[in-house]
Amino acid sequence: MNPEFLERIGADIAKLDAATQLNLPRYGSWPPTVHQFDEKSINVLKTALAACRPVLLRGEPGTGKSQLAHAAAVALNRLFVYEVVNAHTEGQDLLWKFDAVSRLAEAQTIKAGEDKKILLDTKRFISPGVLWWALDWDAAYAVYQSSQYQLSLPEKPTGWQQAESSVILIDEIDKANAELPNSLLEILGNNAIEIPWLKTTIGGKGSVPPLVIITTNEERELPAAFV
């Protein structure tokens, strides 16, 4: 690891050491609240930062697992993005979502003389997912602006820069089928994703990995390799 990388990680660990009680602002549909850190949760977060590994939080619904992720983002002044998983969530949804129905409808209404290549450009029907926003907010925002399929736009903390990294919450992963945890392992291991239609890779070596917090209500057993 390069010295700058280690310096940033050390600074983030120091921020957690100083964290006790935080006022959490409203975030999307999340109401403002107060979060009280305990020693155990602080140690878990510090270990995850130092090891560049995700955190898996187990427990019953309503025990504060998701709030801990938001609190970590506020304490670290990092971008906070989250995805609430359901039975239909696939690994690709964490990277981007593609509106195939609208693209098909557009194809059926193209008139003579119109530029089919521009009108059916994949970027017009893509909405960046949480991993894309977390690894390269600016690239995701550029696609978001040019797309007619605009879903979520994460709020950036005041003064935040991409080098300060992010906190990703993957909530209730036990609701997904086994393919989602397995595909997530590969993505997190690389700290990078390839965007085929942009012919580029975002994230990767040299960048501070996001702090990834994954929650499960243990309604379904997760793959052994994942835990």
Image (spheres, rainbow, N blue to C red):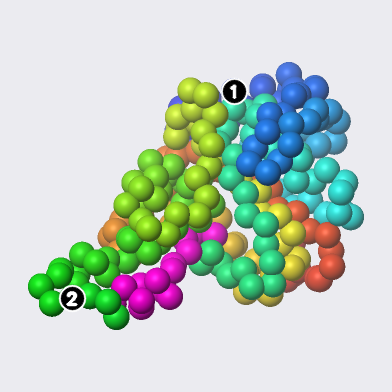
Q: Can you say whether 222 is above or below 207 in the image?
A: below
Determine whether, in the image, residue 16 is placed left or right of residue 198.
right
Residue at x-position 28% and y-position 60%:
199
Residue at x-position 74% and y-position 31%:
32
What span is in magenta? 94-107
Residue at x-position 84% and y-position 28%:
36
Determine whether, in the image, residue 39 is placed left or right of residue 80.
right
Q: Position of residue 111 (x, y in %)?
A: 18, 75
The one nearer the camera, 6 or 113, is 113
* Cα–Cα gap, marks 2 and 1: 57 Å
Determine whether the residue tagged by mark 1 lies in a helix, strand or loop. Answer: helix
The one nearer the camera, 38 or 14, is 38
Q: Can you say whether 1 is above or below 11 in the image?
A: below
Are discs 2 and 1 less than 8 Å apart at CB? no
Check disc 2 and report the residue beneath it.
111
Q: Position of residue 73 (x, y in %)?
A: 64, 34
The one nearer the camera, 142 or 104, is 104
Q: Position of residue 24 (x, y in %)?
A: 72, 29
Single out the residue that lies furthest toward the left.
113
Kind of residue sitting beneath label 1: Ala
Which of the 4 image quarters holds residue 163? top left
Check disc 1 and report the residue beneath it.
11
Single out the residue that lies furthest toward the bottom.
108
